[in-house]
């Protein structure tokens, strides 16, 4: 009986923890934030007054998937920022749980890779939890309207984490193309592909 009670408690705890960090879905309001960029300036949605929307990418320094997508994230920003959809990268990992993801090392990586977009430090993982980001990379495409900032798509950048497919499904690009035509995206959610977010150890 004690074992059954313990299992029930553990199951409830796991369910509660998951509920606390439920991933946003299409149609939800995208929470604003004010996070420190690698240039030590704070960045929020208001930092992009002319934006039509945002490509928010939760990514990190060392996850093999995140590393594999670095150039594709840079390319997304170079292509779509001039069209009103800038990339905003956020590192969701706790620097104690992942020592390669300290703010200083984020600065080093951004400088080395010449990131053209903000790379923000989510101290305390508050924004990570508000969005429900689970892996790196994890993409949230947001549209900007008079009613606020609305999530239009959540998931992977494409279906090619290895970067080898000639006919890859470019989920993020397809979503933005739909928004530019004034249409709702046909695909609003895909399975995120990447490393799990590294959490601060519980005391």
Image: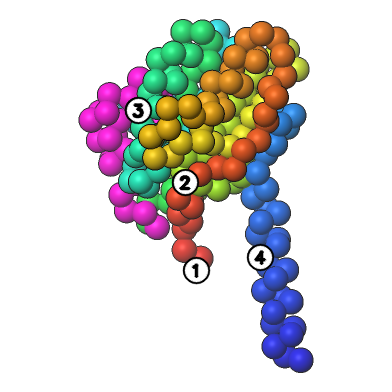
Q: Position of residue 136 (x, y in %)?
A: 46, 43
In the rendered image, residue 185, in percent from the top left (x then y), is placed at 68, 22
In front: mark 2 or mark 4?
2
Name the residue at 46% across, 36% down: 160
> Disc number at residue 183?
none
Task: Based on the picture, tell me whether residue 181 belongs to the magenta stretch.
Answer: no
**Quadrant placement of the N terminus:** bottom right
Q: Earlier in the sequence, mark 2 or mark 4?
A: 4
Residue at the disc numbered 3: 71
Mark 4 and mark 1 residues within 8 Å of each other at the beta carbon: no
Marks 2 and 1, how far apart in space?
A: 27 Å
Name the N-terminal-most of marks 1 and 3: 3
> What x and y, as percent, mark residue 161?
43, 39
Name the quadrant containing residue 127: top right
| Mark 2 / mark 3, whichever is N-terminal | 3
Q: Is residue 25 left or right of residue 114?
A: right
Q: For mark 1, what is the residue?
A: 203
Identify the magenta region: 97-119
Q: Mark 4 — residue?
A: 14
* Viewer-nearest residue: 168 or 79: 168
Q: Identify the residue at image location x=43%, y=19%.
A: 77
Of tags 1 and 3, the one toward the viewer is: 3
In the displayed structure image, the side of residue 125 where residue 187 appears, left or right: right
On the image, the x and y values in percent for residue 20 come to 68, 53
């Amino acid at each position: 009986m004690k074992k059954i009670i313990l299992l029930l408690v553990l199951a409830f705890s796991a369910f509660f923890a998951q509920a606390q960090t439920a991933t946003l879905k299409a149609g939800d309001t995208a929470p604003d934030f004010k996070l420190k960029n690698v240039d030590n300036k704070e960045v929020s949605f208001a930092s992009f007054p002319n934006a039509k929307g945002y490509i928010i990418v939760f990514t990190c320094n060392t996850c093999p998937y995140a590393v594999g997508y670095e150039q594709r994230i840079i390319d997304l920003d170079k292509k779509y920022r001039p069209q009103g959809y800038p990339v905003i990268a956020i590192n969701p990992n706790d620097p104690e749980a992942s020592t390669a993801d300290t703010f200083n090392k984020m600065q080093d990586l951004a400088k080395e890779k010449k990131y053209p977009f903000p790379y923000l430090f989510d101290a305390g993982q508050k924004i990570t939890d508000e969005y429900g980001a689970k892996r790196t990379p994890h993409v949230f495409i947001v549209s900007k309207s008079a009613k606020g900032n609305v999530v239009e798509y959540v998931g992977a950048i494409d279906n090619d984490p290895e970067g080898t497919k000639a006919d890859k499904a470019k989920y993020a690009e397809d979503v933005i193309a739909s928004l530019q035509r004034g249409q709702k995206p046909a695909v609003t959610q895909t399975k995120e592909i990447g490393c799990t977010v590294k959490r601060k150890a519980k005391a």
